[in-house]
Amino acid sequence: MVDLWPGLPVGSTVSCSKCLLKWGVAVVMVALQTGCQTSVPSRPVMTEEEAKRSIPRDERILNRLAEDNRVLEKEFVALRDSGGWQKRGYFSAQESDRMELLLFRFHVGHHQLAGISERYEGVEGKQAQEVHLRAVALGKGQAEFLVRTFEEDQVAVEKLNQPYPRSEISRHTYDKLAGSLRNKVERELKALGRKIEDDIEELSYELQAEVFFGVSRLKKSSAYVVRFSDAQKREVRERLQPGDLVLTYTGGYASNIFIPGSFKHGMTYVGTPSERHAVGLSPERILATSGLPQERGLAENLWRATTSAGRPANLIEAVGEGVKFSNLDHIMDTHIWRMLVIRPCLDSPERIRQLGRTFSYLGEEYDFRFDFADTGRQVCTEVIYRSLNGMQGIDFPLTRRGGHVTLSADDLVTYWLEDRPEAFEFVLYAEEAPLTPGHGARVLHGEAGKRCLEMLMKQGS
């Protein structure tokens, strides 16, 4: 998707010499650019004869876009009027998905209008100028509508300003549209301000990410992991199905201080390519049921068999490096003190929708701020939240921690046990076996396993 407007953001400021340096450089660069613009080769202008041949086609496109706009405007208004975010202060996963899809359609139409407007700019002839002016008017009308519809709703404005990486929508859609309605001087000043804020925000985030990423790798020398036998690992694999949630705790890591609870991490088991095929996964079915706006490498990822390390790719998780494929056996060998597997009780179309959404986040960045209100980056349980919320009445309550709304792995388990026991099926629970040398594991299922889990949740970690 082409970025139709110059970039911009929201964000906090930090006091550091690097920020001031970047700010100063930005000001100097803008001053230099305004003083000596680099010449850009002009595009060839269509002849009147060429315009006559293309006008009928482009008029049909404009008629279709005008009708699409009317439909899209009604859907934006319906979303605004039905939204519960005004009271809760953030968009639910379903509301966020709906906004993303509408924005994607908006960007596609706006891009087409920009292309038609540019194509006829400077072309002589009454008909050509009418096409140009109509495209400009439709594009301006789109911007005015979206700005006017949400201008009194700060939560929605922040949502519209977020990036949507899987739809290739860049940051600050709302601010760019609002800026396009201002005069040229105002637009340039706003663009400069956004650029400076973006640089400061990016540096602030990079520093925060570097601190967390470094701390998360610190581990006590006395820390250990539970040892699973080959037979136990095989038993676990045989019990799992694509779509199962795998929640884990690893002792000894300094990052545990940032994440509360008996479980610290959440992953989705996606199985092998043959297992994915067996549950009916295909790019066509995923796109038909998930509401995703585009494929973006879905087919390639869907049938990917190995991780970057060459192991079987049967998990999707969000870690410091981003959302990626992982291997269950490797996780069990290196990162488990305890593990819980639960299965969302979904029908086949819902299972495909859940897995499709999970696959759609592959490659996205990790969110070191743990902010579920921002869709631009993902944490481990956020991928689970966004893939499942709204199905079979599942409505995970988000909790405000550190100024952001989040869902911890423990929040997820508590929601299942206390609020929606019918929404998930217990699959297994694993922990260190009592009085076993070498930290050997035990794998529990059925009522015995669930009782151990309930006792753990009551007493805490």
Image (spheres, helix red, strand yellow):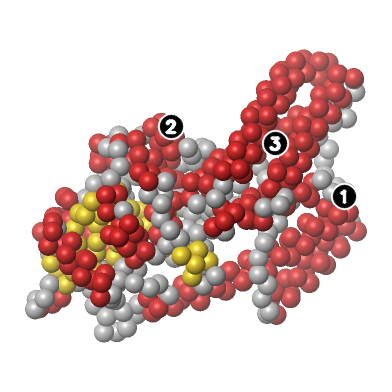
Pointer 2 local density, CA inside 10 Å: few below 14, some 14–19, many at least 20: some
Q: x%, y% of residue 56?
A: 75, 15
Pointer 3 local density, CA inside 10 Å: few below 14, some 14–19, many at least 20: many
Pointer 1 local density, CA inside 10 Å: few below 14, some 14–19, many at least 20: few
Q: Is residue 240 visible?
A: yes
Amino acid at the residue labelled 2: Ala
Q: For mark 3, give the secondary structure.
A: helix
Tell me, for residue 87, which label it has, or none. Answer: none
Between residue 93 and residue 440, name the one nearer to us. Answer: 93
CA distance for labels 1 and 2: 43 Å
- Marks 1 & 2, CB-CB < 8 Å contact: no
Q: x%, y% of residue 427?
A: 20, 54
First in residue order: circle 1 vs circle 2:
1
Residue at figure coordinates x 37%, y 49% from the top left: 394
Q: Quadrant of the C terminus?
A: bottom left
Q: For mark 2, give the secondary structure.
A: helix
Amino acid at the residue labelled 1: Lys
Residue at figure coordinates x 71%, y 65% from the top left: 197
> Which one is in front in this view, the residue at disc 1 or the one at disc 2?
2
What residue is shown with label 2?
A: 288
CA distance for labels 2 and 3: 24 Å
- Marks 1 & 3, CB-CB < 8 Å contact: no
The quadrant in which residue 207 appears is bottom right
Tell me, for residue 110, which label it has, or none. Answer: 3
Amino acid at the residue labelled 3: His
Tell me, for residue 184, which label it has, or none. Answer: 1
CA distance for labels 1 and 3: 20 Å
